[in-house]
Amino acid sequence: MALPQESQGLFEAEGLKIHYTGVGKIKSTFAAQKLIQLHKPDWVLNLGTAGSQKIKCHQIVECVRFVQRDPLFAEFQQKTFESIPLTNLAKVTCGTADFIEKNEPLVECDIFDMEAYALAFVCDQMNVRFNSIKYITDSSNEKTLRDWKNNLHQASRSLLYEYQKLIIG
């Protein structure tokens, strides 16, 4: 996860070890590389929150395609990363940038976040399987920050439930 606010302490209360990357592509790239070098996992599961102008709030989705949505990268051919689906959740394209999207994105995507593309990139470079599950907290508009904060508790409960389904069965 990017921030402790996304887990609301629920994962820790269950005795689960969560790694926080920080917000944005640079921080998450650095954290992912450091954690992979230290722990040498075969698989990284990114859980977190996202905004969307297409998908209603309170939905949980699985990101299976990752693109950069920064204006600079829209002008150039960019690498798209894909993951092998893990769940029966709705499958989406996640657009990552270091800003909150309030307009029509320049790159086709279903949801907006600030870390998943960077995490997918690092995992690809280090030959580690990557999956990402996101809870839609907001509509990526002028109310984004308020809606994100108001929906964090439900997001953390829903993400914990999905995690437990995956790991425990």
Image (tube, rainbow, N blue to C red):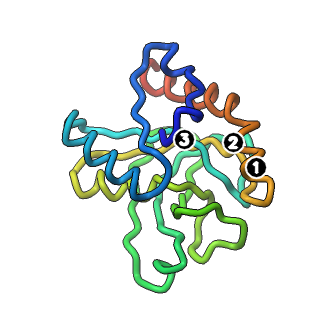
Mark 1: give few (<14), some (14-19) or many (20+) Cα within 10 Å.
Answer: few
The reply to whether callout 2 and callout 1 are in contact (CB within 8 Å) is yes
Q: Which picture quadrant has residue 19?
A: top left
Residue closest to the eye, 53 or 2:
2
Mark closer to the chain start, 3 or 2: 3
Residue 17 lies, in percent from the top left, at 39, 23
| Mark 1 lies on residue | 56
What residue type is disc 1 on?
Lys
Q: Name the mark on residue 48.
A: 3
Q: Gap in Å between the C-alphas at discs 1 and 3?
A: 16 Å
Closer to the camera: disc 1 or disc 3? 3
Which of the labelled discs sits on residue 59, or is there none? Answer: 2
Alpha-carbon neighbours of circle 3 within 10 Å: few (<14), some, or many (≥20)? many
On screen, residue 112 versus residue 141, left or right, reads left
Distance Cα–Cα, label 3 vs label 2: 12 Å
User: Is residue 164 placed above or below 67 in the rendered structure?
Assistant: above
The label nearer to you, 3 versus 2, is 3
Q: Circle 2 — which element? A: loop
